[in-house]
Image: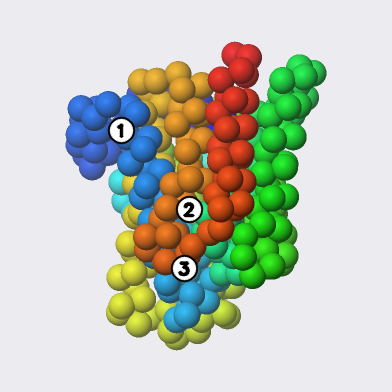
Amino acid sequence: MVMAHVDRMSDAPAGGGGLAAIAGRTLGAVPPPALILAGIVTTQVGAAVAKQLFGLVGASGAVALRLVFAALVLLVVWRPSPRLNRRTLAVVAGYGAVLGGMNLVFYQAVERIPLGAAVTIEFLGPLAVAVLGSRRWLDGLWALLAGGGVVLLAGGGGSGGLNWLGVVFALLAGLGWAGYILLSAALGSQTSDGRGLALAMSFAGVLVAPVGVLDAGTALLQPTVLVAGVAVALLSSVVPYSLELEALRRMPPRVFGVLMSLEPAVAALAGLLVLHERLGVLQWLAICCVVAASVGATRSARR
């Protein structure tokens, strides 16, 4: 279910230069489930590291660093051609715009609510894509379970529940994630390997960079901030996307979706271990509800 869009991008033969070939051979020796779990962990650890940057450059500055550095790395690895026809350019621009907007509002959510809560609420986006249009009562049950989990998450736990502006930003991020999935098929049909992702990430970086500069100013140029920005880009974008692409070459998308359903729980653990964000018993129960709904919807989905 979640991010199963990438399988369209993985159909083309590997290419993109020496670095991509070496990386492909290395990842090919790792079992696909291990790749997915490693990608989930790096994504959430990267988000936790990014949150630690908020005090220096703000949420927008952290997003700008992530997208710009991720774009630079992907351009070096995949070396996409700048010559695009009008249709491909439109798809890349749309995908990049959604990618940039999704990350921008997600970091705004993480600035206001715990990481695990933000990812759990954001997960409604791909879950909605999985059950949207289904007429089976079982999928409606999964949707109700996930919705109930989010309501419990927003209002449960100590100190009166979550910041509602943070919840709204997380919901917007979920909407962006749904659009990101739906646009991926178009991107995969117009580009091959990671070239389309490199171009879209570059466009996202161009869009978000001015917002980050306005928010953070010259603080973005501090050496420690730049190093942390590179780490966030690698952990949150370059490494997990590369791992997912390789895993989807060797495993069914349905299995991939089940494994990706663990992401809210891993995010909560990353928030606890890296950021010392503690959730209440009801909030952990809410995360379990969303994870169970995602696994159920994925396993029962038709091909």
140 over 262 or under it: above or below? above
First in sequence, mark 2 or 1: give its number: 1
Can you see residue 8? yes
Q: Which quadrant: the N terminus?
A: top right
> Whole-Å distance between the Cαs marked 2 and 3?
14 Å
First in sequence, mark 1 or 3: give its number: 1
**Residue occupied by mark 3:** 51
Q: Residue at x 64, y 70 (%)?
A: 159
Instruction: Answer whether labels 2 and 3 touch (C-beta < 8 Å).
Output: no
Q: Quadrant of residue 26?
A: top left
Residue farthest bottom in this picture: 218
Q: Residue at x 48, y 53 (%)?
A: 268
Residue farthest top in this picture: 303
Q: Is residue 229 left or right of residue 197?
A: left
**Residue occupied by mark 2:** 268
Q: Is residue 44 left or right of residue 32?
A: right
The label number, if any, that marks residue 296 in the structure image:
none
Can you see residue 204? no
Q: Which quadrant: the C terminus?
A: top right
Depth check: 281 or 65 in front? 281
**Residue occupied by mark 1:** 34
- Image spot of residue 131 (x, y percent): 70, 27
Q: Amino acid at mark 3?
A: Lys
Q: Say which element carries label 1.
A: helix
Q: Quadrant of residue 139?
A: top right
157 over 303 or under it: above or below? below
Q: Amino acid at mark 2?
A: Ala
Q: Residue at x 45, y 31 (%)?
A: 259
